[in-house]
Amino acid sequence: MIRLGVLISGSGSNLQAIIDAIAEGRLDASIELVVSSRPDAYGIERAKQAGIPTLALNKESYADPLAADTLISGELEKANVDYVVMAGYMRMVRGPLLQAFPDRIINIHPALLPSFPGAHGIADAFAAGVKITGVTVHLASEIYDEGPIIAQRAVEICEDDTLESLEQRIHSVEHQLYPQVLQLIAQGRVRVDESGVVRIRED
Amino acid sequence: MIRLGVLISGSGSNLQAIIDAIAEGRLDASIELVVSSRPDAYGIERAKQAGIPTLALNKESYADPLAADTLISGELEKANVDYVVMAGYMRMVRGPLLQAFPDRIINIHPALLPSFPGAHGIADAFAAGVKITGVTVHLASEIYDEGPIIAQRAVEICEDDTLESLEQRIHSVEHQLYPQVLQLIAQGRVRVDESGVVRIRED
């Protein structure tokens, strides 16, 4: 059993996928705290409905970003969180959080990193005309959308795809992959080797 | 039936895959000329064994790269080539060739572009620790490893892969994919749309 803190900014559909995986016994974890960078994020409702404590910040909270991350890491530590899960969190994680949870902050990105980093991974891939994109789960590091890659899934872009149909397919892969990767972590099967590459121990 | 010129620099295993696909009726094309940037490339032997005319250049031929590409495009035009296929060709294609064959020079790259461009696509992906890499077939442009993407295939990097085992798997996907894409071109099903994205017409 691992104790998770989840960082969100929006609808929280990945948060919901994690809540559901725990409820269905596919993920040996508990969510101890949901932190939202926006007070109006629908994900806060999802957390409340699941009986999970929430911390809602706002724009002003981030006026001093280091102070915000000090506050967040303090709350996560009070909640005895083992791992921090970024789920559509639209803020950088900075020094105070990275130092409090070294190699224990996990992010999901809707593209096959290192291709298409940044806030518009799906739209950028679609506009570039690549034929394969996908989903990446990785450890957060000082550099946005870098850090050791834990798992990736390819998603084909089809001839009749619109941006919307591609977004739907990518999100649906995210919702499958994220709980699976968290379960690998819960089972203690994920480590970063000396060259910075993630190794997954066979079951 | 399309008439191909093939540019090589080394062993010519992709050239062989194309020769085989033509011989087996999977690709409606003929190879009219094989140009090698190196006189000792084994691919020259493969061309000779298949009865294909060859043009072997050397380091000195490229002392003036524009002159080299003028020479090459002149020979390809004399051979009435429709499309130019880069198959492990380790030189840039420059203005004279690009202008002589606009949107008609095709390249294969052993990674999922835009990730891992350059001369070491497989090794770079392996060292970076990505979990999915692949193969890209694209139209050549002024910028190395850019240009509209025609097709991509994902290749998973497994926990027990070595660089060598990954190279083998990638090359085997290249040998399947390249003739398939050339056949799409032979069938007139490939076009670049107004936004620079390649569209494949359904059969």
Image: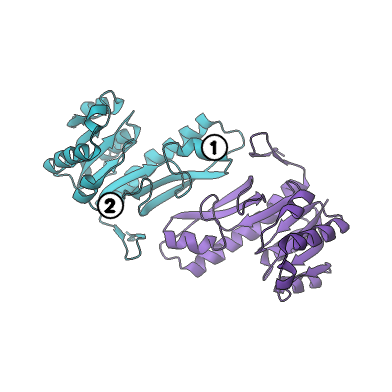
Chain colours: A purple, B cyan
User: Do tags 2 and 1 sit on the same chain?
Assistant: yes
* Chain to which the residue tagged by mark 2 belongs: B
Give above or below for B125 relative to B37.
Answer: below
Residue A1 spot, x, y in % from top left: 83, 50
Q: Earlier in the sequence, mark 2 or mark 1?
A: 1
In this view of the protein, which residue sits in the foreground, B171 or A67?
A67
Local secondary structure at mark 2? helix
Q: Between marks 2 and 1, how big is the CA–CA gap?
A: 31 Å
In this rendering, position of residue B127 left or right of residue A80 = left
Is the residue marked by circle 1 packed among few (<14), some (14-19), or many (20+) residues within 10 Å?
A: many
Local secondary structure at mark 1? helix
Residue furthest to the front in view is A64
User: Would you identify the image quadrant in which residue A80 lies?
Assistant: bottom right
Is the residue marked by circle 2 packed among few (<14), some (14-19), or many (20+) residues within 10 Å?
A: many
Residue B101's disc is: none
User: Would you identify the image quadrant in which residue A66 lies?
Assistant: bottom right
Residue A101 shows up from this direction: no
Q: Which residue position holds label 2?
A: B185
* Chain to which the residue tagged by mark 1 belongs: B
Looking at the rendered image, the disc whose residue lies closer to the viewer, 2 or 1, is 1
Residue B11 spot, x, y in % from top left: 34, 28
Seen at 52% across and 40% down, the residue is B125
In this rendering, position of residue B45 left or right of residue A190 = left
Residue A200 spot, x, y in % from top left: 68, 40
Residue A199 spot, x, y in % from top left: 67, 38
Seen at 79% across and 61% down, the residue is A72
In this view of the protein, which residue sits in the foreground, B198 or B180?
B198
Amino acid of disc 1? Phe
Amino acid of disc 2? Ile
Seen at 42% across and 49% down, the residue is B152
Seen at 80% across and 57% down, the residue is A73
Q: Which residue position holds label 1?
A: B126
